[in-house]
Amino acid sequence: MRAEPQSFDRVLSSMCTEPHPAAREAAERFLATNPGDPGTYPTVATLEDEAIELLGEIAGLAEPAGYVASGGTEANVQAVRIARERADARRPTVVVPESAHFSFNKAADLLGVELAVVPTADDGRVDLEAVRACVDEDTAAIVGVAGSTEYGRVDPIPKLGEIADSVDALLHVDAAWGGFVLPFTDHEWHFGHAAVDTMAIDPHKMGQAAVPAGGLLARSADLLDELAVETPYLESTSQATLTGTRSGAGVASAVAAMEELWPDGYRDQYVRSQNNAEWLAAELESRGYDVVDPELPLVAASIPTQLFEALRGEGWRLSRTADDELRVVCMPHVTRNQLESFVADVDRLEDEVGIEVPVSGE
Amino acid sequence: MRAEPQSFDRVLSSMCTEPHPAAREAAERFLATNPGDPGTYPTVATLEDEAIELLGEIAGLAEPAGYVASGGTEANVQAVRIARERADARRPTVVVPESAHFSFNKAADLLGVELAVVPTADDGRVDLEAVRACVDEDTAAIVGVAGSTEYGRVDPIPKLGEIADSVDALLHVDAAWGGFVLPFTDHEWHFGHAAVDTMAIDPHKMGQAAVPAGGLLARSADLLDELAVETPYLESTSQATLTGTRSGAGVASAVAAMEELWPDGYRDQYVRSQNNAEWLAAELESRGYDVVDPELPLVAASIPTQLFEALRGEGWRLSRTADDELRVVCMPHVTRNQLESFVADVDRLEDEVGIEVPVSGE
């Protein structure tokens, strides 16, 4: 193989990161196993049970059901699928905040369900009045986001659970990114805090496992039964996953990362990442840019397109929010040094491209 | 990590195998990349283009469209989804042989399409008259299997293409397992032989890549466009895959395996596997068991349940066909020594469990 995998030195746009060394080692050892065929590969099947136990511990669920998915998209698709199967409505609807990840659009397209998209309030959290006005007997599920992709915002999950209960709908929480930082905050986001039915929580994001290691959790096994298809030819007899053959590397690395880091290592990482986010937010603000307050380790700031493109030209991997803001995700591989170097490039390039820095608020 | 991944010494039931050393090395190097975010991870995105070029070469397609999927299930689901999007019918139908993989049931359930299951003839290939009788204006696609999961049979793909054309339906070929052995046989199975629109062809099965490395090929890019959703937050703008974040390890290992093995290494492996299958078939037949002729490297044989269970008790990982036959997949990790040891266990356990061996044909 001639190609060199790129370094993470300038990656500020990704919600994935370098796997923890223990996670990498476990992934390499289990590369040739398939948890999709648990009869044939029993060791990795046992590891998957451990992964779900650990995810349950993190997410406030004493007896979790679930599996290690390919990622948050699969977990979100499967949660919507469970809700569709549970619903009585001929045309079931899923209520999602406008801050929800685009995988819900994919789910709706795949599964033939309607999305009812509700606005967020000024604080970036879903508008509860709008949710209340929107639900009815066709509502199969309400989605709450615990760590939104653009701004790291956490919806009022307990209130969403009450609304879901009032119309006999399921509550799905998308904590794909947030799940490994939220335990160290005051947010109410998980099964122990609210009437949550299903959750996406990805070890391969803030959990520092190797891709592919997403997580689908369900409050009870009967919810997963909605997904089961029969599996002839395998040693096992049914399968609830979206994919068939699956990566043992992902499963093993998830267990290794969680055993190594839960809870202290993750807490330390949260503190580092959150401090980095607050530092970057303050630096950008002091230069006159509008910055969205980083409640979780994710910074969004309005910078001129010309500057954005010039930074990209320097090799910084950056992404934008829908409102065209710069978006920096403070993942574990993002260090203070790296951010200092980024801010130095901001200063240098402002001059080079001749940017008139706006005064904040104008 | 305490657990030891199991060895392949007694695995006769899997359609996956130990990755080739070059594939393993590439997987390990690209563990921390995500081809689902090609703007941020451009190196692995380029490797994915190479993977699709190579898969196209194997499958007779000069200008292939496609992507590296999580596996055959995703490729089959996505092919059915393309057909659904293309169809005019309100309730589109997909015609599948009864020999088709259970992932088509998963696809139908997910996507809300009807499956019309047609029988196979005595030779294990789909009954063409039954297909002709079954298609109509609601037919969105016909599925042909090129290397069936149970018996390794190859449907008459060119004829299926003609029937599909006659009702303006797509033809999808499931060569997930067969695609890396069929090039060395006389079968007509690929884009160069017939009016094939889409194909599942998995590097992580006979292609000796690391999981997850499936393949979805399409005759033209506009077919893939049916799958695209918009992708805010990423550096790229749309995504045709079923999952979001994807494994760079799978992509890199697929390229490494194909560069190393196509065509000579795969041909040598096909010859070894096919000889092993024919040897095992002859050994079982000589002991009085009914054996399905192994057209591809896969052996099915009727053995008593008591013997099957006794073999499992010795640690052999075995699976069954729907008709309760023993099914042995002669993957690259399955050696002649291993099969000799298996047959020795058959002889020993026949005595131990007191089996009266039937005379073939009775």
Image (cartoon, coloured by chain):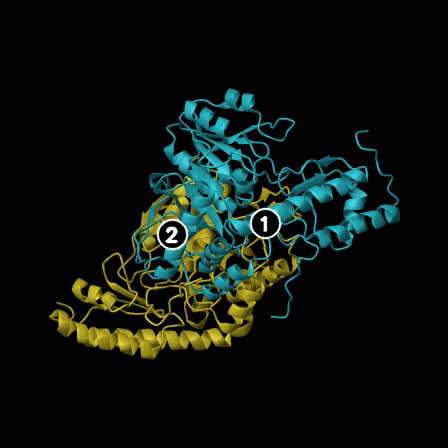
Chain colours: A cyan, B yellow
Which of A160/B76 is in front? A160
The secondary structure type at the circle numbered 1 is helix
- Viewer-nearest of discs 2 and 1: 1
Name the spot of residue B168 as percent of width and height, x first: 47, 46
A299 is higher (above) or lower (below) than B308: above
Residue that badge 2 annotates: A49
A356 is higher (above) or lower (below) than B16: above
CA gap, disc 2 and disc 1: 26 Å
Name the spot of residue A111 as percent of width and height, x first: 45, 38
Amino acid of disc 2: Asp
The secondary structure type at the circle numbered 2 is helix
Q: Is residue A316 visible?
A: no
A190 is higher (above) or lower (below) than A262: above
Q: Is residue B240 left or right of residue B96?
A: right
Residue A354 occupies which quadrant of the picture?
top right
CA neighbours of label 1 inside 10 A, class few (<14), some (14 to 19), many (20+): some
Residue that badge 1 annotates: A268
Amino acid of disc 1: Asp
2 and 1 marks on the same chain: yes
- Identify the residue shown where x is 54% and y is 65%: B27
Quadrant placement of the N terminus of chain B:
bottom left
